[in-house]
Structure formats: structure tokens, C-alpha cells
Image (spheres, grey):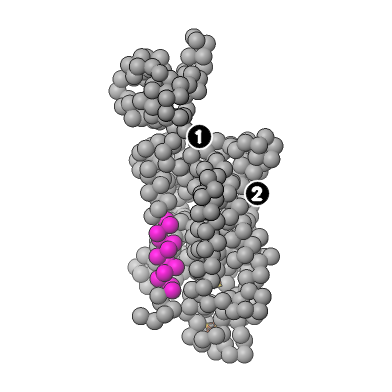
Amino acid sequence: MKNYKLVMYLRLGLLTLFAVLITIAGYLHIVKGGGKSPSIHALCPFGGLESLFQLFATGSFISKIFAGTMILFVITLVVSILFRRSFCGLICPFGAIQELVSKMGQKIFRKKFIIPSKIDKPLRYLKYIVLIVTVFYAWKTAGLWMSPYDPWSAYAHLPEGLESVWSESAVGLILLVVILIGSFLYDRFFCKYLCPMGALYGIIGKISPFKLVRNENICINCGKCNKVCPMNIDVQNSKEVKSAECINCQTCVLNCPKSGTLYSKVQKKSVKPLVAIALVMVVFWGSIFAFQKMGVYQLLPEQIKSGESITFDEVKGYMTITEAAKATKTKLEEFYKKFEIPETVPPETTMKSISKIVPDYELDKIKEKTKSSN
Ligand code: SF4
Ligand code: SF4
């Protein structure tokens, strides 16, 4: 197999691997509870951006966001400063899902559809509006207000069943279906038009020293680069790709038939596609590993230490009923009575999930009651 094909498969393989790992984490969060596996919000750098104002104003994070999410957000910003929108092209799990769906569509239709430029160009600004609106309301409400409208959150909650996702985030589910259909027909549909983080990384990447250049003296104008670019950038007629849309996927470089025509460069040094991918991986995963070693990459709520007792008021939504009874030093039977939990609810249910089985169950109200009865 030719070297360039190996690198193309390597990139897609890495993207797919991250998507699988995140999907497993999301699944474990649902089946094991928020105290054992991080939520999809904690694992998404957008959560860090949403929590930024709250962090500066009060020194705390918004619900479901932890120090690790903030660190993840900062690492992705550093990746953008160094390597432009590489997070989108080489790491983002939602990018991987779009690419896999697009590949299926292209196999079935045997062609790549492209939205006419008159519609495509104005639509590309939509993601900047999404960025401004979502961040404004997240900072204003100091919460994950977007969660019911978030297609990524809807995807992560699919293991709960369609009915449950529909009842909690119908808009998010509809958007997820629209994005999947869009990706089936068009490359990187969500990245191009809707992703707020893609918009932010694109703007920040403008200051990056990492460039993609074309040597026009040896280019044979075959048009292959334009044809394969998932972001539909006019590489063939650019001396240097300056577009904030470029996700540094290296597809154009790897498909260019005239070796040495298209290449990435930092300062005056050219960087081979495999090296470019490896550098991004080292910076991204190396930073996460380093913060983990320092013990600050925290993505889960502080756990109640074994043997430590808490009051009823301190019962957390991520605890299972059994864990909460144990932590409050109450017999399980008594705890069910105290928290008005019907016997039909299994003890391994998390406190916040009781309302999914008993729709009118309101944990906060019951906690208030237990407070006043103490
Ligand atoms: S694929 Fe390479 S040779 Fe062909 S137009 Fe693009 S840069 Fe030029
Ligand atoms: S210009 Fe090249 S590196 Fe950038 S998105 Fe298009 S194919 Fe990928």
C-alpha cells in the first residue's frame, strides 16, 4: 500500500478510535452514573468555554463541568494556536461521525454533493452566530442551557432510548438527525455550518505559524486538491491556504499527484503529513497525560470518601440510591421512605434518574422537605 494511503487510513483510524472511546464513556456515564464515568458535557471542550464567565466571576464551574473540562478547553486552544483547526480534522469525535457517514453516502451515491456557493457562503457564517448566541446565554444563565438543543448531548443519551431522549431534548434529537442526513450528503456538514467550537478554533488558528502552501511553479493544475477537500476550499488557486475553514486534515496534501507541490510548513521548515498528525497528537494527548499525572485533570464530581457521612441535603444526583443510603447512614428501606422513592425503582438507579422512571419525582423538592423535617 502506498505511503500516502497509510497516512490517510491512520488519520481516519485515529478519529474513529476517539469517537468510539467517547461513545463508550457516554454509555458508561448513563449506565454507571455520573460519579463513575464523566458526562459528555465534561468531555467536550465547549463546556470549558460555557463555564469561563462563571469561573472568573465566582471561581467555580457550572454544573457538570469540572477542572478537567477547562483544561481540555485550554489544550484545544493551544492546539489551534499551534496547528490551526487540527482538533476538528484530527481529534473531534463528532468530526469522525460526520466523516464516516459521508463516506457511506459517497459509496451509495458514487459522488460527492456540493452545496452551491451562493447558499454555502452565507451559511458558513451561521456557526459564528451559534458561537455568540450559545456562549452569551451560557454565561448569562451560568448553566448548560443548551443541553436540550445540543445534538451531541442527544447522541450521547441514545443508550437511554429514543423515547427518553425525545422527551428531554427533542430539538437536540431533531438536529442530530438533520446533521446525520446533512453529513450523508455533504462532507463535514456540522463543521462547516453549525459547530461553535469550529468557529472559535478557525478564528484563533489565524495567528498560527502552521501554514499550508502550494508551490505554483510545479503545480500541474489537476484540481485533485479541490476535489478531495472536505471543506471545499479552493486550494488549487491559493498560494497559501489562509481559510479559517481548513481543518488540517492533510487530505489535499496526501492526494496531490505532484510530490512537493502542496505541503505544510512552520516558519521555513516543511512538515510531512505524518509528522503534522504526530505533532498534534503529541501536544494534545501529551498535555492531557501531563495534567493527569499532576492530578488536576478532574472530570468527575468530588467523591464522598468511604466511611464519611453526609446529611440528606448533601445527597447528590450522580449517586445511586444504594450509595446515597450508605453515605447518609440510613437503611435502604428507610431511605426509600425518606426520599419518597417508589419500591419499583431499582436501588442502582442514580438519584437524578429517578424522575425518568417516576416522571413527577423532584429530587430538589424532596431534599427541601427532608431539610425542614430534620
Ligand atoms: S492536487 Fe497538487 S498538482 Fe493538482 S492542482 Fe492541487 S496542488 Fe496542483
Ligand atoms: S485545505 Fe487541505 S488540509 Fe485544509 S481542509 Fe481542505 S483538504 Fe484538509
Residue 196 spot, x, y in % from top left = 59, 53
Kindly identify which numbered label has been placed on residue 302. Answer: 1
Range shown magenta:
7-19
Residue 373 spot, x, y in % from top left = 49, 9
Image quadrant of residue 170?
top left
**Element type where label 1 sits in the image:** loop
Label 1: how many residues lie within 10 Å, few (<14), some (14-19) or many (20+)?
few
Verify whether residue 101 appears in magenta. Answer: no
- Label 1 sits on what residue type? Glu
Image quadrant of residue 209?
bottom right
Residue at 43% across, 72% down: 8
Q: CA distance from mark 1 to mark 2?
A: 31 Å
Q: Quadrant of the N terminus?
A: bottom left
- Label 2 sits on what residue type? Ile
Kindly identify which numbered label has been placed on residue 252. Answer: none
Q: Main secondary structure of the magenta part?
A: helix
Q: Is residue 354 visible?
A: no
In the displayed orientation, state which residue is furthest to the top.
Answer: 373
Give the residue at mark 2.
Answer: 132
Is residue 254 found left or right of 331 in the rendered image? right
In the image, 106 versus 228, the foreground residue is 228
Residue 63 drawn above or below residue 117: above
Residue at 59% across, 61% down: 79
Earlier in the chain: of badge 1 and badge 2, it is 2
**Element type where label 2 sits in the image:** helix
Residue 255 spot, x, y in % from top left = 47, 79
Residue at 47% across, 48% down: 152
Is residue 291 found left or right of 343 in the rendered image? right
